Every structure is written in C-alpha cells, then in structure tokens.
Image (tube, helix red, strand yellow):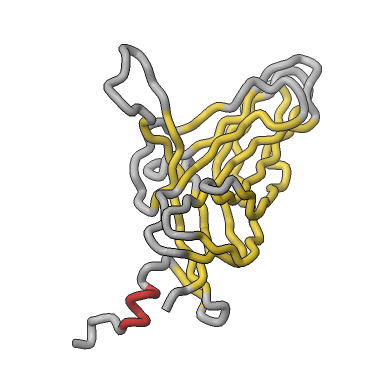
Amino acid sequence: MTDLLKPAQQFLANYDYFDLSNETGTIIYNGLSVSNQSSLPAFGSTTYKYALSREAIESETQETEGATISDDGVSFDKDFDLSAFNLPQTIRGTAHVTLNINLVGEGDSVEAAMSAQIVNATTSTVIATGFSNPAAQTTGASTDAKVTIPITIPSTDFKAGEVLRLTIFGNTVGQPTTIGGTITVKHDPTTADYELKFYCPFRINN
C-alpha cells in the first residue's frame, strides 16, 4: 500500500525532523516538573523532580524560582532528566535549548544570562555546555525574556540504561548592593510562553 512507510522511513518517523546529509535526526523534548513522592506523603509535604518528555504533558508546577540572588554567579540550577535509553544511542551536532525566564531585581541594575549543560547522568559526565546572550536586565522590577542556547555536542555514545540530562543554570551579573531578587525558569509545555524545549540531535540508526 502506498500509504505505508518503508523501513528506512519508519526510522525517520522517530524524529521530529532530520538532516540526511549529516545522518542526524532531531528529537524535541519538553521540560516539566512532576511529583517526586516515593510513598504516600505527609500532610502538606511536596517534592518535585524535573523531567524531559516528548509529550506535551501538563507540568505539576508552571515555573521554578531560583535562590535569592546574593552575589554575581549561579542562583538557579535544576536537572531535567530523560528516561533511561532502552537501546544504545549516539548524540552529536548542534542542540538548542529554548526557554522563558523571569528576572526580579532589587536596587541597582541586575542582568541575567542562562547556560545549559548536557550530561550523562549515569556516569556524571558533562558532555557539552552552551551559553545565552544576556537574557534580561532590570532595575528594581520584574522582566520577562525568551532565551535560545546553542550547544555543540561532540559525538557521544549512550549505553542502554543510561540517562541523558539537561541542566539549566541561571547566572546573574551586575548584582545590586541591595541583596535580593530571583531568576525564575518557566517549564509548562501546555501553556504559551512557558515552554522549555530541548532540540537534541541523534545519529540516525538504520
């Protein structure tokens, strides 16, 4: 039947888009938060973990606020994990991370820049890191910004059972003399301007 995919096409259907000249296919993952309870929780007890999913699942929380800014440097640091691979995989090429942030400053001007690391969470190996332009600037106010981070990934093999991790960092510069303010990262795939997306290139298996 003409509407059936050929075997090679069936492989390509696993990717959101692909570049046959480079033999890579890109999968788009959504960042979100889910419950991290391992048993029936105590009253009022909440705990979350952060995940990557191809499905646009509603996030348990729409956004996560970082630590109170007290100096230049990292005030936001969260790991978004993919489920363990069932089969060996190779990632390579240029990945992109797109996200929406909110910066709150106090006193003088404060500026935020985001960075992202791709990590083999099973072996705690950092594979590649990318950095954004300054993403937002504010003086005693609240500012929203969109960020796109390119990450160049060397050819890296993952074994079956290993976990791919995306770590998001929020970095502040020009810290005001008045301590305070926060970086908040949004991560709800089902809400406009709250999406966190990870475009990850894989070597095409055929």
Q: Nearer the viewer, residue 106 or 63?
A: 63
Residue 126 position, x and y percent, is: 64, 49
Q: Nearer the viewer, residue 108 or 47?
A: 47
Q: Quadrant of the N terminus?
A: bottom left
Q: Quadrant of the C terminus?
A: bottom left
Q: Vertical placement of 200 versus 3: above or below?
A: above
Q: Nearer the viewer, residue 35 or 66?
A: 35
Q: Is residue 75 left or right of residue 176?
A: left
Q: Which residue lies most toward the top here?
A: 43
Q: Quadrant of residue 156?
A: bottom right
| Residue sitting at x 64%, y 20% | 68
Q: Is residue 77 left or right of residue 174?
A: left
Q: Which residue lies most toward the left here?
A: 1
| Residue sitting at x 75%, y 18% | 107
Q: Vertical placement of 50 versus 71: above or below?
A: below
Residue 98 appears in view:
no
Residue 115 position, x and y percent, is: 66, 44
Q: Quadrant of residue 96?
A: bottom right
Q: How many marks?
A: 0
Residue 22 position, x and y percent, is: 57, 78
Q: Is residue 6 left or right of residue 128?
A: left
Q: Is residue 203 left or right of residue 127?
A: left
| Residue sitting at x 66%, y 28% | 75
Residue 49 appears in view:
yes
Residue 188 position, x and y percent, is: 42, 40
